[in-house]
Image (tube, rainbow, N blue to C red):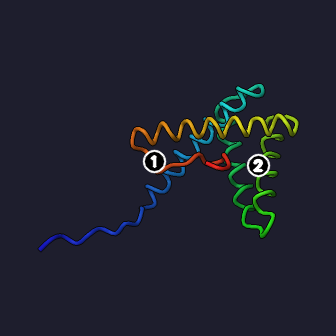
Amino acid sequence: MPPLAQPASIGLEDQLLAFAVSLLIGGVALHVGTHVVADARDYGHAVLTALLGALAWTLLEPVPLLGGLLALTAWIAVVKRRYRLGWLRSLGVGAAAWAAAVVVLAALELVGIGSVSALGVPGT
């Protein structure tokens, strides 16, 4: 008799690991984005900014009709506040961070790691 199939659910440890890796990738992307557009701070600053941006996005994105726009504006405001930038430079950091996240995630996909995202970077 064949063994019973294991459920496809993911354990808490796996979820925490995926969260941590996704947050670190988001931090890398934001760190790269600030190096491109502004005076970057340390990597830890970028990781905390990614976490705060993800929190703002999570809270505002479900708002009916305007959720995406509100969430994006809040995310840019988090970058603006954390890096003491203007709105346009913060938007530039966001664009550079998004591009960096896409490159990192594509590279991870090439080596067989495709179950992560870039937490704290919208659109990834």
Residue at image point 79% right, 45% down: 76
| Quadrant of the image occupied by residue 95 | top right
Kindly identify which residue carries mark 2: 75
Please rate how many residues cluster around mark 2, counting C-alpha atoms within 10 Å: few if below 14, some from 14 to 19, many from 20: many
Residue at image point 81% right, 63% down: 66
Q: Residue furthest left?
A: 1
Kindly identify which residue carries mark 1: 114
Q: For the N terminus, which image quadrant?
A: bottom left
Seen from the viewer's position, the closer of residues 106 and 53 is: 106
Q: How many numbered tags mark residues here?
A: 2
- Please state if 103 lies on the left or on the right of 51 as rendered: left
Q: CA distance from mark 2 to mark 1?
A: 25 Å
**Secondary element type, mark 1:** loop
| Quadrant of the image occupied by residue 62 | bottom right
Residue at image point 77% right, 35% down: 92
- Please state if 84 lies on the left or on the right of 32 as rendered: right
* Residue type at numbered disc 2: Trp
**Dot 2 and dot 1 residues touching (CB under 8 Å):** no
Residue mark closest to the camera, 2 vs 1: 1
| Residue 35 drawn at (x, y percent) | 70, 26
**Secondary element type, mark 2:** helix
Residue at image point 61% right, 42% down: 26
| Residue 21 drawn at (x, y percent) | 52, 45
Q: Earlier in the sequence, mark 2 or mark 1?
A: 2
| Quadrant of the image occupied by residue 98 | top right
- Please state if 86 lies on the left or on the right of 106 as rendered: right
Residue 28, numbered label: none
* Residue type at numbered disc 1: Gly
Seen from the viewer's position, the closer of residues 64 and 22 is: 64
| Residue 79 drawn at (x, y percent) | 78, 41
Q: Residue furthest right?
A: 86
